[in-house]
Image (cartoon, rainbow, N blue to C red):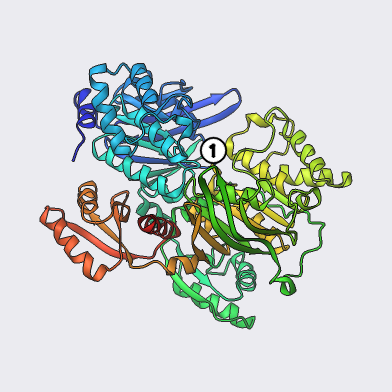
Amino acid sequence: MVDSFLAHGTEAGGSAPSATIRVQGLHKQYGAVKALCGIDFSVSPGEIFGLIGPDGAGKTTTFQILAGVMEASSGEVSVLGQPPREARLNLGYLTQAFSLYADLSILENLRYQAGLRKVPQADFRDRATELLARMGLSQFPNRLARQLSGGMKQKLALCCALIAQPRLLLLDEPTTGVDPVSRREFWDLLAGVAADGVTVVAATPYLDEAERCNRIALIYDGKIQQIGTLAELQADLALHRIEVRADALGETEAVLQGAVSRASSALVDLQSFGDRLDILTPNVAQAKSEILQLVDQQKLAIPRLEANEPTLENVFVSHLRQQGADPIYRAFPFYRKPKALSTEAAAVAISADRLQKCFGEFQAVKDVTLAVRYGEIYGLLGANGAGKTTTIKMLCGLLPATQGGMSLAGETQNLHRAEVRSRLGYMSQKFTLYDDLTIRQNLEFYCGVYSIPQKLHREKIDWVLETCGLVGRENQMTGSLPGGWKQRVAFGASVMHEPDILFLDEPTSGVDPLARRQFWRLIRDFARQGTAVLVTTHYLEEAENCNRLAFMVAGEIVAEGSPTQIKAAQPGQLIELVTAHTQRASDLLRQQVEPWRVSIFGDRLHLVLDCPEQELGPLIQSLQGAQIEIRAQRPLPFTLEDAFIGTVQRAEEVSP
């Protein structure tokens, strides 16, 4: 059903132009730097259009020109049939930076934005009530913005953008740092907004959520390289994906990696995850035969092979590699002798036994028990406020536990001692470097903090600069770096001293997919040296890199296992439905099953059913009774995000 205020907003400007946005030959130059080099694209009314690319590709510059806050150097730009500056009152713009006022309440932020956009006071109350209800914020209108979780802040920012009935929404990485449950809710809300006629243009570093767009444009080096629907981009890739699972995964990876570089091989690309390998190939049958032959030659156990569609990340990475955009990989200059993991596999580096933490009457962590071994990558996942960061701070000695036992590198007492902390690396959620120091000064400071021998400073710092692609820019002020680049430097600073134990709290937030791959290749290098890694992330596709995972809900661990085990433990089946009326079908299904079980992905619906044999038939009959034709349906394997959301939602349903 179309909300009245959005329907009115769509009609307010009269008949809509054939294209909400039309861009032709757009150039933008900053001195000698060419940010945009003649890009062309158009966006239709009611379309969700994704703009994806690595850091520095030109996404934010494009948004600023479309929003009318920056002039183009040359080219033609039409927004709602007008020059961008003249269309500003009819668009909403969410920037990367937090755009709310922390000391104003939800309602006060909305009222302030309505005043700026000249919303009549008589209309404000009804619009605010409707928006807050739609976003799930109506229960606490007087809560201060700084007291909201990341997901709630982004929903409020979306309310502020919608209060003036815009016909166009520009969203520049709106869900960075937002947990998976809130991200899915946010994108379902965007689908509803688009169904009401509002055009949405969004940039995102999360390629799984970019799959929710109707069309996607890949931008790199100021140029649009590809544009199309997800299916069109997958077809253009002309490759298939094979998931490889094996008992001796490391040895299998080494054997197959050697084949990837050979021109005669059917194996085009290999990506390692926590408990599987992904192979890209133009010929599934030939690739499977080659894989089995290679492992047999090395007397390895026969792996389990499963063919699947390539992901959008496969498309993105493969195309950018063709453009020579793959980041430089340089192995870390290890001086510490690797741990003999074959004999120390049972050695526990990090452990917690019934760990608890209370802040007054609020219990943030409840009876958490876990163990992380040397050489293992362990993922701790949960929604915002689940207790992940509190747990990490207790485990690394930054926060005292209320109750329970802990051990860290074999120590159980005084974990904040210098001799214990010197064996740790810690990268927090918040950027841990100093903005008013240069990049080199920051790295020199951390060399001193971690007591790295002076003779090794230059080699360690040069490694960070080269890995981050910052050679020649080491005297640049750190505060001037984009967020993704800051994360890279912060990671380098946290590992220069070769820690035995590494804590990474959302290390790749805002980092583009190519750099994220490099992050995880380096993390695996440290794990192979024997480092125990405990990591949190909101990006579930990258959580596949972990050997084991734990899901936290309201301070408790509710599921634990390898990525494959956790997905296999999900009850029921994920069903994909294709209809001509995606939003109507979603609205109808959400009336008959729990809303979290239904999600929109572009022109498709994903539906989670515990007993599909009994449930699916009546639901399809209900859709057909509403004159909604089912054009296609098929079962899909659960992703880790599906498993996470299902686990969290079921745990919340049974909690008191």
- Of residue 303 and residue 239, the one placed in the foreground of this image is 303
Residue sitting at 61 percent across and 75 percent down?
A: 248
Residue 513 seen in the figure:
yes
Q: Quadrant of residue 131?
A: top left
Residue 242 seen in the figure:
no
Residue sitting at 39 percent across and 50 percent down?
A: 211
Residue sitting at 51 percent across and 34 percent down?
A: 58
Q: Is residue 538 above or below residue 613?
A: above
Q: Quadrant of residue 532?
A: bottom right
The residue where tag 1 is placed is 221
Left or right position of 64 against 326: left
Percent position (x, y) of residue 563?
50, 64
Q: Quadrant of residue 203?
A: top left
Residue sitting at 69 percent across and 32 percent down?
A: 434
Q: Is residue 408 above or below residue 8?
A: below
Most distant residue in the front direction: 361
Task: Give the amino acid type for the residue marked by disc 1 in the picture.
Answer: Asp
Percent position (x, y) of residue 471?
72, 39
